[in-house]
Amino acid sequence: MAHIELPVSPELGREFPGIVGPMTYRPETAGPINDLVNILLRGESSLSRGERELIATHVSWRNDCFFCQTIHGAVAAAQLGHDEPLVERVKTDWANAEISAKLKALLNIAGKVQQSGKQVTADDIAAARNEGATDREIHDTVLISAVFCMANRYVDGLATWAPTDANIYRARAEEIVEHGYVKVTEMATTMVAGAKATPARNSIEARG
């Protein structure tokens, strides 16, 4: 059970899972977070959406955030030919995964940011540049890692719940790929508003 009372999903009969729960609780803060995540993971970039999702997934795995590593792993797989074994390798053993040398160098940076920003060295940056990484790609890798450290702690700090059925994450990933992160949270918030309005309408009709 979450540490605070979160909005209940009419479909689930309990609070929304993972970060969607606190985001529906506080839409004012959800908006800027979602906008930033949408820019980093779905906006214009020389890194593919799948590659950026792999960075988010790896950082979330390092932080032991089950919800975030599972949902972003599913979104990554959905954009990488549904290659779930690749996602699992990148999470746990990126150095030996079948990915580009450039992405490996960026994952090295992301992993160090997860420990502490000060762990990133000039040699780490030089190694990424030697593999073809641009300053923009290095910047975004650091920011993705930092943002997901925040998101992971947001999710777990409030003790939100996470489904264990992988098919739930696969289905949600397809929605995110099609609509983006902002739209999915907006849909959940609309559901909450509708559920709150229904009892009020019923009460008015009953009095009438």
Image (cartoon, rainbow, N blue to C red):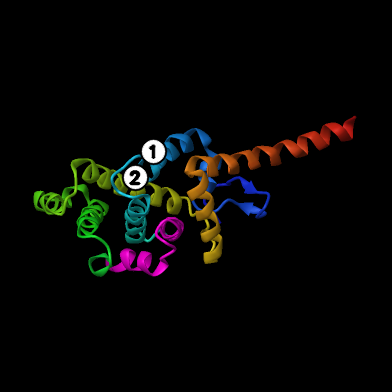
Marks 1 & 2, CB-CB < 8 Å contact: yes
Q: From the viewer's perspective, is 48 left or right of 201?
A: left
Closer mark to the observer between disc 1 and disc 2: 1
User: Which amino acid is tagged 1?
Assistant: Leu
Q: Nearer the viewer, residue 178 or 88?
A: 178
Which amino acid lies under the numbered mark 2 shown in the image of this protein?
A: Val
Q: Is residue 164 visible?
A: no
Per the image, is 167 magenta? no
Query: Distance of mark 1 from mark 2, alpha carbons?
Result: 9 Å
In what quadrant of the picture does the N terminus appear?
bottom right
- Give the x, y percent position of residue 129: 14, 49
Number of other residues with Cα within 10 Å of mark 2, as a class: few under 14, some 14 to 19, many 20 or more = some
Query: Is residue 70 located in the magenta-colored stretch of the structure?
Result: yes
Residue name at image x 75 percent, y 38 percent = 198
Task: Work out which residue is located at the far right of the displayed protein and give it.
Answer: 208
Q: Mark 1 or 2 closer to N-term?
A: 1
Q: Is residue 94 left or right of residue 194?
A: left
Main SS class of the magenta portion in the image: helix
Which contiguous range is marked in magenta? 66-93
Q: Residue at x 31, y 64 (%)?
A: 90
- Residue 157 vs residue 92, the one in the foreground: 92
* Residue holding disc 1: 36
Instruction: Give how far across and how far down residue 118 sits, in percent.
Output: 17, 48
166 left or right of 109 in image: right
Q: Is disc 2 placed on a helix, strand or loop? A: helix
Which residue is disc 2 drawn over? Answer: 147
The image shows residue 116 at horizontal and vertical percentages of 22, 51
